[in-house]
Image (tube, helix red, strand yellow):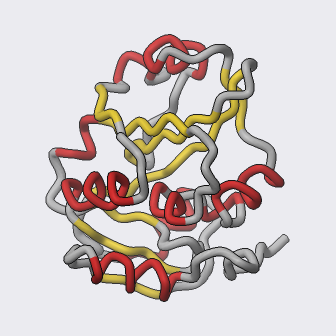
Amino acid sequence: MNRPTTTMPGKATPGDLIARLEELGIPCTTHEHRPVHTVADNRALRGGLPGIHCKTLFFKDKKARLWLTVVEESRELDLKALAGLIGSARLSFARPERVRDILGVEPGAVTPLALINETGEQIGVFIDRAIMGADLVNLHPLVNDRTTALRPRDLLRFLAACGHDPKVVDLSPATRT
């Protein structure tokens, strides 16, 4: 099933996002491509795009708290170990309706950049320390038919401008082996 590559009504568009990045003085480059729904799709389409390629996971815990975790695309996480690392109760993936309502994106386009749409919910934001060592970080710009590259420190600046205090942590202890 093909998912739409558009954002939700009343939420920021990719153009709005790029304009906000420009307003903050954050340089970025966006590449258009066919919609991607998996890490394998992304690898097949991106060619030689430089930088680290990320996946973003949006969770709810058993206490109904929300968590956004950004990791390198190939990293597989043990949710029980992740919950312990970030200080949450048992984690499960947020339902598609919550992704749409809170982040304003389709489940296949979850990105920390979607916090431009965040509706006042308290969301714990965690970024794997390995991402911060890259020259560029590649993320979906609210849709899954584009990839936007920016510097990791600029991602942190953007998230702070959206009212979030992301935590950079070593998530390797939560990696499945």
x, y percentage for residue 97? 83, 54
Up-down relation of residue 135 to residue 149 (above or below): above
User: Residue 74 sits in which quadrant?
Assistant: top left
Observer-nearest of 1 and 69: 69
Up-down relation of residue 64 to residue 143 (above or below): above
Q: Residue at x 49, y 79 (%)?
A: 146
Observer-nearest of 143 and 46: 143
x, y percentage for residue 51? 24, 62
Observer-nearest of 64 and 54: 64
x, y percentage for residue 168? 29, 34
x, y percentage for residue 4? 75, 79
Q: Quadrant of the N terminus?
A: bottom right
Q: How many marks?
A: 0
User: Residue 19 sits in which quadrant?
Assistant: bottom left
> Is 32 positioned to the left or the right of 30 in the image?
right
Q: Residue at x 28, y 82 (%)?
A: 22
Q: Residue at x 33, y 52 (%)?
A: 160
Q: Residue at x 36, y 40 (%)?
A: 166
User: Residue 92 sits in which quadrant?
Assistant: top right
